[in-house]
Image (spheres, rainbow, N blue to C red):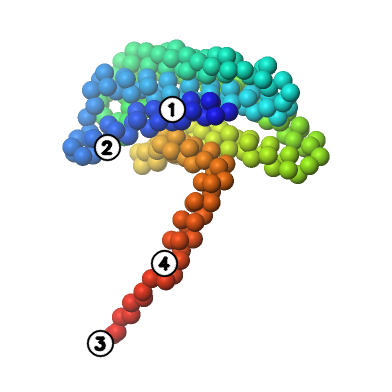
Amino acid sequence: MYFFLLNLALLDLGCISTTLPKSMANALWDTRSISYAGCAAQVFFLLFLFSSEYFLLTVMSYDRYVAICKPLHYGILLGSRACVTMAAAAWGTGVPHALLHTVNTFSIRLCQRNSMDQFFCEMAQIFKLSCSQSDYLRASGIIYFSICLTFGCFVFIVLSYVQIFRAVLRMPSEQGWYKAFSTCLPHLTVVSLFVSTLLFAHLKPPSLSSPSLDLVVAVLYSVVPPAVNPLIYSMRNQELKDALWKLITRCVSDAVNCPSFSINSL
């Protein structure tokens, strides 16, 4: 589990590093420009990291299934070589997936304006600059293929958790319930946050689309999940929870005991 968490942390770090540094540099230098090659690289790496993370979350659901439903066979089914192979498959599958979408996106003819209402190069915003209906339909076909692939992984995750919950409910002790749910709930929370933000970003009705809403939604799916994932998994650590509770109680006590000020009216 910790080996997969290491890979997840690296992917989260890469996701944030793909978009935020350039947007921060633009804010500091008061510019809004990005080169054509830089935009293509940003699209490729963002798609590569997001798709690899989704495939890795799918692999992690199988890891949780074997750990809870077949604990005696865990060492055989998920040895060190099997874990490395599955993690490498998750990383490797993201490369052709991202390359396919990047080549498809930047092969369309852009004959309208060259500005996007976004803080990074988003594939959906680039499609809006297209002036060819045939290019747009071809690009949409590849996107639908990607949606089907994503839905297949989601079905696999759901089926894994159906088997997990059935196995947990058959456990006689509440301690077993707590241990199983404490292991699965962080992963399930991360998957739900990741999938829900992506689906809302790319499948929301056109009537809800506006520059400000698109910007907020882009932050939700590109920044929030990678930033929140380490916190979600860290909450399984009892020492970290105790330290966070001490910090909160200290801040509350300092706020209560701080000197008060009064204003005398003239």
- Give, as a three-letter code, the residue at label 3: Leu
Estimate the spatial distance between the alpha carbons at disc 4 and disc 2, rounded to whole Å: 33 Å
Question: Callout 4: helix, strand or loop?
Answer: helix
Residue placed at 68% from the left, 16% from the top?
76
| For discs 1 and 3, the disc positioned in front in the rendered view | 1
Q: Where is residue 19 in the image (x, y as percent from the top left)?
A: 34, 31
Q: Which of marks 1 and 3 is nearer the N terminus?
A: 1
- The disc at residue 52 is none
Residue ID for mark 4: 255
Residue ID for mark 2: 24
- Give, as a three-letter code, the residue at label 1: Leu
State whether residue 183 is above or below residue 125: below
| For discs 2 and 1, the disc positioned in front in the rendered view | 1
- Give, as a three-letter code, the residue at label 4: Ala
- The disc at residue 10 is 1
Q: Earlier in the sequence, mark 2 or mark 1?
A: 1
Residue placed at 29% from the left, 19% from the top?
110
Q: Where is residue 23 in the image (x, y as percent from the top left)?
A: 28, 35
Q: Are marks 1 and 3 in contact (CB under 8 Å)?
A: no
Q: Few, some or many C-alpha atoms within 10 Å of disc 2 (few <14, some 14-19, many ≥20)? A: few
Estimate the spatial distance between the alpha carbons at disc 2 and disc 3, rounded to whole Å: 48 Å
